[in-house]
Amino acid sequence: MTNTLLSTHNLKKVYGKRDTVFEALKGIDIEIGAGESVAIIGKSGSGKSTLMHLLALLDKPTEGEIRLNGKNTSKLKKRKLNRLRNKEFGFVFQSFFMNANDSVLNNVILPLKIAGIGRRERKRRAMEALKIVELDDKFKNKAKDLSGGQKQRVCIARAIVNNPKVIFADEPTGNLDSATGDKIEKLLFDLNREKNITLIVVTHDEELAAKCKRQIRIADGTVVSDVKTKKGAKK
Amino acid sequence: MKVLDVIRDANSNLWRNKIRSFLTILAIFIGSFTIIMNSAINAGVNDFMDKQIANMGGDGYLEMMPTEAYESAMSLIGSTGPQEYTEDKDNTNASSYIKDEQVEQAKQIDGIKVFNVLPNSSADYVTSSRTDKRYRINLNLVVEGINFDMSNGVSPNTDENGAFEIAINEDLARALGYEDVSEIVNETVQIAVPSNLKCYTAIKRSECQTIVDVKVTGTQAPGILSMGGSRASLSLWKHINKLNYEGMPAETNRSYQATADVEPDKIEDVKKALEEIGLKAMSVDDEVGMFRTFFDAILIVFNIFGGIALVAASIGIINTLFMSVQERTREIGLDKALGMSNGKVFLSFSAEAIMLGFWGSVIGVAISIIIGTAVSGVAHETFLKDFPTFQLAIFEPLTMLAIVAMIMFIAFLAGTLPARKASKKNPIDALRYE
């Protein structure tokens, strides 16, 4: 691994105080290289979501540090963190998180709008992203009128519209039937391969995890195994 | 995120829950409507007052009468309490005339430029060639340097030896057969002037009357101060006085009224000095001021109502936005996850509050203008018929803008509470929220 994108050192996260203290992460040390596809696997309550939130800079660790491109992120100001998330990360969630009453186009545009990009430019880029997920003909439709698979494709378009370095996918196929899920998976791995976008998938689905080149297993807030496989999502 | 996008989104977010937004806007509208109407009527009344003052002319104009006469007039209308009878005081109204020594003293007062004692003049009736009917006429003297509310033509001359002229009251002009009142300008009317001494012994009133031909120089719009009177030129006034007191001893020809032209910045001092020598002086402001005080009191009450309505509307805004924050918890979480700053989240909810205030107040302005114009039209057909220069409601663009801005600011203040709540939401908790 020549090019480390994200790394953690003794990462700890504690929730609650005194009697109700709960140690969600008990010291995680991992390195993720640019262009990798990584599955973070674990049962619910294992701490995998907490790890993803920390990696995605959505939350601050109680202890330890996260380095992005070698830079310690704990010293960054809130503004800078917001900018980083907006420019470098894309998010795909299990339950989509779309503005149901808004159009497909407006949903995809959201990160660009937050970034303050002009109307014409953001429309152009959103249409490009929609073309990649093959939904450019539905840009005017309301998000709520789409099927589950289409919704998740819109979310992927939204995740890639700002040309991110990393996509965080939290159970991306959890709400989809297997055929639709396969399509979404293929889309994500294609993006990983063709655009060299680092893919970090949080899942408890072994099948999906197996398609990643690397599987990090989490249990009780610690890494129990970290395996790199050759086959990954080649096929 | 660009501010323009924030505003645009805030506006479209309002229409997500149409009924809720509409009701909140309605509440703001009620408050703003009350305040806008008040301010428009206030502007209308003040404009009318100002016109009346402008009609009366200079800031330095004083009208005065003996203090005793003023007080007994006031006691008659109940403004002051009963007055005790004393031997050393003139107790009859008729003897409350302006005395020679008062005139001498008044002329010494610093600040008085011109002091005029008005001779008493009264005419019986006026008639014209267009009618057989005769109408009673209430004459006032024209005052130099003062513009009356002339609706047609010009003021009569103030030359002591000038032509006999009057500016006639509009209603009187109509009664005299000039349906189009502008036609009476430059016409000649006949005024009957009695000679008081002859009238004591005359069998028929007409035997003691002299008919004077008078040229009409203009028509006078009715107003608070003219009160249906007509203005006579100085020469006519003096001529009438001469006819009234023909053959009577000089001491009967006494005056009850005087006017003064005063340096405007000394007017209060002059009034005090006149009071000391027994003359009650009223400036134009004093006369109009009584009406102003009355209207101001009413408007304060209505503005309080408007204010209460706005407070209630503000609570509506807070409630609406709290519900909105609650409903959009996940959306806020997503926005924040995608890099929106707390400040922008705060701004977007504040913008929504401001938009509520904007629409409420703009609709308030629009409806106020429509209703104000309509009511004004009806009023001029009915109860304000005699006051054509009185615009019931005046909508000054700057005032309207200021009110809209004020209500938007109030809405913003109301919105800060929910906006703060939204901005403090943790993106992870917000995304987990079901």
Image (tube, coloured by chain):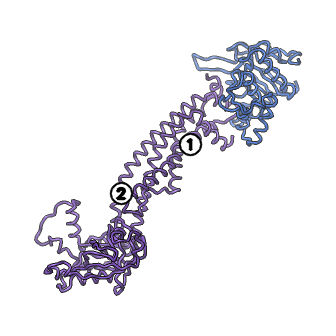
Chain colours: A blue, B purple
- Location of residue B2 by image quarter: top right
The answer to whether B314 appears left or right of B91 in the picture is: right
- Disc 2 to disc 1, C-alpha distance: 40 Å
Give the residue displayed 71% in from the left and 16% down from the top. A221
* Residue to which mark 1 is pinned: B354
Q: Residues within 10 Å of mark 1 (few under 14, many from 20)?
A: many
| Label 2: few (<14), some (14–19) or many (≥20) C-alpha neighbours in 10 Å | few
Which residue bears the numbered disc 2?
B383
Disc 1 secondary structure class: helix
The percent coordinates of residue A20 (x first, y second) are: 58, 16
Q: Which residue is more in the foreground, B428 or B395?
A: B395
Q: Residue A197 appears in which quarter of the rendering?
A: top right
Q: Quadrant of the N terminus of chain B?
A: top right
Of residues B58 and A192, the one nearer the viewer is B58
Q: Chain of mark 2?
A: B
Q: Nearer the viewer, residue B240 or A15?
A: B240
- Report in which chain the residue with disc 1 lies: B
Residue A16 place in picture, x, y as percent: 60, 20
State which quarter of the image contains the C terminus of chain B.
Answer: top right
| Apparent side of residue B434 relative to residue B213 in the rendered image (left or right) | right
